[in-house]
Amino acid sequence: MILQIIDICYLVAVVLFILGIKMMSHPDSARRGNGIALSGMLLAIIASFLTPGLDNLILIIIAMALGTIGGLYSAKTVQMTAMPQLVSFFNGMGGAAAALIGLVEYGDLPVDDIGKGSVLMASLVIGSVSFSGSMIAMGKLQGVIKDIRINKILGFLVLAAAVGLAIYVLNSGEPQPILVYLLIFLSLIYGLLFVYPIGGADMPVVISLLNALTGVTAATTGLLYDNKVMLMGGILVGSAGLLLTLLMAKAMNRSVSNILFTSFGTASGAAAPGQSGDQVAKEINTYDTAILLAYAKRVVVVPGYGLAVAQAQHAVHDLEKILEEKGVEVTYGIHPVAGRMPGHMNVLLAESDVSYDKLIEMDDMNEQLPNTDVVMVIGANDVVNPAANDDPSSPIYGMPILEVNRATNVIVIKRSMSSGYAGIQNALFFDAKTRMLFGDAKKVLNGLVSEVKNM
Amino acid sequence: MEAIIEYISSNQQEFYVFILAIFVGIEVISKVPTVLHTPLMSGSNALSGVVIVGSIIVLGKTDPANYLALSLGFLAVLLATLNVVGGFAVTNRMLEMFKKKPGKK
């Protein structure tokens, strides 16, 4: 009877995992999704305690208590900016746990069970790689570990050696405890070599990939025990994690193979201002922009000549109204020379009944920008070009600008990457905070209005 | 090689689950807005802490006289718990910014 109860608990836990992940992919339900996934995990843990013949209960409880205290403490105290490091750290812990399970289990497994033996070797190798890789990723994000050039071939050699060793151990027909330790050692080294040469800026993608790997080890551990909750949960994380890796790479305008195989030196791309030829601007789509806007507290619109050309003043007012309905504070940052004549923007916006007290002059706006969640630059270019502040060689050096890069996020709506009236490149487009939304201002704004409405 | 094929055919059920779960994982997050990438990564990281189930079983079945296995198992439970608890807690903190805003106009 107790075995059946355990099975049903595991089944329910798997359903909760799937629902949890599903809900976490939408902003409204994300928090509840996390809670649901957590309740699935608690259920799975309780069920595993019901396993008949469980010994060492006191040790288990002490270990869990220590882990809980450590986990909660670090999660509560970490700085918001250091979150990715912490995720990487936790991920490494999961990988290490899987490798340790494999290590303990190796002593108990009959040497002639090659099927289970291969699964166990996979757990050991992938778990160790995930652990050491995550630690390096954490160090890189923290800035403790610098980017170093390492020949990728070295990594592959180590991996090949590890795989060869695993095959030898499996086929030797005898217990090989020392070789198993050597296998773990080689896998750890491979994890280091795998992550070391990848640029610091690409770490989020790498962490997502390592996370998928940890999922796979959880699944192989599940195979080892014929345990469905580990198998299903692990594979779920593995495949969702892999897809997420691809999505993240795409959002950063990078390809995964690019990151993994040709990566060194990418982080130095943002070097000298003016040399923007090798820089990549990051794109965003209407849907993501709408989400960013709808969940912001303060949004600032910086209109420019492009808004006038596209006759988008009514569309921008519509967007403002619908965002205000959602409780978002929307104001306009008006640069004195935005457009082709002084006051051009005020006139244009007044035409579409934008309330006058929402139009904020440049100096006042610059004070407010650091507390702004999203700045939407619509068809403006030179009036937000940071070169005016920091590049003495620029023709617009010394011109006062709207310092939009002081806000948390910058969305630039523009028809193409072409430069502004002054004919100079704009470093803002390559800023880490900036996302480009290409298209005709009117069409883009109407698209945003309908996306925000649907939320 | 033969042994592996043998293993797969005698554990068909597991391998069906394996394959289907891959598709479920992909389906379930097919449309994720960029702002949720990091929280979702963190959340699925917490889920990979499901190895805690394995570590509890492994420590629970260890011979209390085998000190090496005991300490390795102990460490496995501790690390897996860190992964689960820390993972969910940090995800929750990230998602706090999506709380419904008070004072809707």
Image (cartoon, coloured by chain):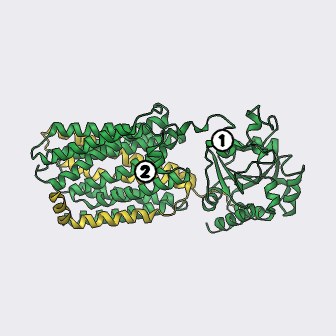
Chain colours: A green, B yellow
Q: What element carries label 2?
A: helix
Relative depth, front residue between B52 and A290: A290
- The quadrant of the picture occupied by the N terminus of chain A is bottom left
Relative depth, front residue between A138 and A7: A138
Q: Give the answer, above or below, for where A265 lies relative to A413.
A: above
What amino acid type should be assigned to the residue bearing mark 1?
Ser
The residue that mark 2 highlights is B88
Give percent across and percent down for residue A155.
Answer: 35, 39
Q: Is mark 1 on a helix, strand or loop?
A: helix
Q: Can residue A67 be seen at all in this image of the molecule?
A: no
Pinpoint the chain carrying mark 1: A
Relative depth, front residue between A421 and A99: A421
| Residue B86 numbered mark, or none | none
Pinpoint the chain carrying mark 2: B
Packing grade of label 2 (10 A; few <14, some 14-19, many >=20) is many
Q: Can residue A131 be seen at all in this image of the molecule?
A: yes
Q: Do the residues labelled 1 and 2 touch (CB within 8 Å)?
A: no
Answer with the quarter of the image where residue A391 lies.
top right
Q: Give the answer, above or below, for where A9 lies relative to B64.
A: below
Packing grade of label 1 (10 A; few <14, some 14-19, many >=20) is some
Inter-mark Cα distance, 1 to 2: 40 Å
Seen in the image, is A378 located left or right of residue A297? right
Do the residues indicated by labels 1 and 2 lie within the same chain of the protein? no
| Residue A276 numbered mark, or none | 1
- The quadrant of the picture occupied by the C terminus of chain A is bottom right
| In front: label 1 or label 2 | 1
Give percent across and percent down for residue A211.
Answer: 40, 49
Give percent across and percent down for residue B38.
Answer: 50, 50
Query: In percent of the image, x 69 and y 65: which residue is there?
Result: A449
What amino acid type should be assigned to the residue bearing mark 2?
Phe
Query: In percent of the image, x 82 and y 59: which residue is there?
Result: A309
